[in-house]
Image: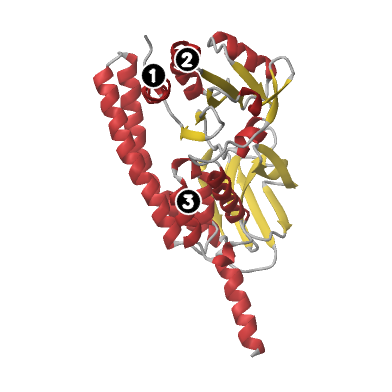
């Protein structure tokens, strides 16, 4: 019985990390750089968090520690362009880096990394296809060929649909490896709530300790609370003058909560459509609250003025950690939520003509 319990324990650990052991050790070499500070770090809440570091001696370095469940971390060398993402798990991981060519980096010893690389290999044809279509779109845009642009848009959407399904398929087929919840959470903006709920149900329960599984589960819970028909969660943030503004103070009009940022190209491209909606329907009872994911106050205000966004704006200047955007499960921008006069969510992510049509439905045609 004791031996059986030991075997079962090893199986569980192995499935969770795609490879057992009780400590990670990264044994690295860099061809092209002999000395420097190697930094092991991760992204958390839109910011970099240093996990550990080591001196590079004669092109060699070692970093060791423990990790509860595999995570995607990053190796870099201070004052260099080296940037290597890798899944760290409790095993001996060798990383051989070519300073002049990141594509030549070889990572061995992490079964989670192997699973991730398998996924990336599978995605290569789709990524190449999307890149070709994108280049065709850019070429068409340069000569203002609207027909070619529309064709490229349509082709891109079709390939993107295949991309979404391929990610889901990979996750289902590898549902006991942390790469699965990582991929779904990282690309959560691509999926609706039902897709995410299905993905969560498909995951093996041994992944429950993974940070990616926890984040994915939390995202599902947040999205459930902000679906159409739900009362919009309240929040308070500072406006451009530094005064506190509450969402509830704007109740009484049809209200668009518009999540954007000055640094977001697609947001700035969409702003003229939002301005048009404001000009046409503001007098009929339409209002907008801009929620910025900026972190630079001056650039935020400059963008408001430059784009002629003449409605209320708030921000806590916390970038992707913006409290309001997190409250609404925003994973990409531009994003918006439309509320009725009572503060109930009636639509999400309306763009261009879709927004105008919805406002005409709610407020009547503009005379």
Mark seen at residue 284: 2
Nearer-the-camera pick, 76 or 327: 327
- Please state the horizontal and vertical placement of residue 295, each as a whole percent of the image: 67, 25
Mark seen at residue 100: none
Nearest to N terminus: mark 2 or mark 1 = 2
Spatial distance from mark 1 to mark 3, Cα to Cα?
36 Å
Q: Residue at x 49, y 60 (%)?
A: 201
Nearer-the-camera pick, 301 or 337: 337
Q: Residue at x 44, y 44 (%)?
A: 191
Quarter of the image where the C terminus is located: top left
Quarter of the image where the N terminus is located: bottom right
Nearer-the-camera pick, 280 or 223: 280
Q: Is residue 275 left or right of residue 242?
A: left
- Please state the horizontal and vertical placement of residue 4, each as a whole percent of the image: 61, 86
Nearest to N terminus: mark 1 or mark 3 = 3
**Residue wearing tag 3:** 196
**Residue wearing tag 1:** 364
Q: Residues within 10 Å of mark 3 (few under 14, many from 20)?
A: many
In the depicted structure, whether residue 77 falls above or below residue 96: above
Q: Which SS class for mark 2?
A: helix
- Residue 102, can we see it? yes
Say which of marks 1 and 3 sits in front: 1
**Residue found at the very far bottom of the displayed protein:** 1
Tally the numbered discs. 3
């Amino acid at each position: 019985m004791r031996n059986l319990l030991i075997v079962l324990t090893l199986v569980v650990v192995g499935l969770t990390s795609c490879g057992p052991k009780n400590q990670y050790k990264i044994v690295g070499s860099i061809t092209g750089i002999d000395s420097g500070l190697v930094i092991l770090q991760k992204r958390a809440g839109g910011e970099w968090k240093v996990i550990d570091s080591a001196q590079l001696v004669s092109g060699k370095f070692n970093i060791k520690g423990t990790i509860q469940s595999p995570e995607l971390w990053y190796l870099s060398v201070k004052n260099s362009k080296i940037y290597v993402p890798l899944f760290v798990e409790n095993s001996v991981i060798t990383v051989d880096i070519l300073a002049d060519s990141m594509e030549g980096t070889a990572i061995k010893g992490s079964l989670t990394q192997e699973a991730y690389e398998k996924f990336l290999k599978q995605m290569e044809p789709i990524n190449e296809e999307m890149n070709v279509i994108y280049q065709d779109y850019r070429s068409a845009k340069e000569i203002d060929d609207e027909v070619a642009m529309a064709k490229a848009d349509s082709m891109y959407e079709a390939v993107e649909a295949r991309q979404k399904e391929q990610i889901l398929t990979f996750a289902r087929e590898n549902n006991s490896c942390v790469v699965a919840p990582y991929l779904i959470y990282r690309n959560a903006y691509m999926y609706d709530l039902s897709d995410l709920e299905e993905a969560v149900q498909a995951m093996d329960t041994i992944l429950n300790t993974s940070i990616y599984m926890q984040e994915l589960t939390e995202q599902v819970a947040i999205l459930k609370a902000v679906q159409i028909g739900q009362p919009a969660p309240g929040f308070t943030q500072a406006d451009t003058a530094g005064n506190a503004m509450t969402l509830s103070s704007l109740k009484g009009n049809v209200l668009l909560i518009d999540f954007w940022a000055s640094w977001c190209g697609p947001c700035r491209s969409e702003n003229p459509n939002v301005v048009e909606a404001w000009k046409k329907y503001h007098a009929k009872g339409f209002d907008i609250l801009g929620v910025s994911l900026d972190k630079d106050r001056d650039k935020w205000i400059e963008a408001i003025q430059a784009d002629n966004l003449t409605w209320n704006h708030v921000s806590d200047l916390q970038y992707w950690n913006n409290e309001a955007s997190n409250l609404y499960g925003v994973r990409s921008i531009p994003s918006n939520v439309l509320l009725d006069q009572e503060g109930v969510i009636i639509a999400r992510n309306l763009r261009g003509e879709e927004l105008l049509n919805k406002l005409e439905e709610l407020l009547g045609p503009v005379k």
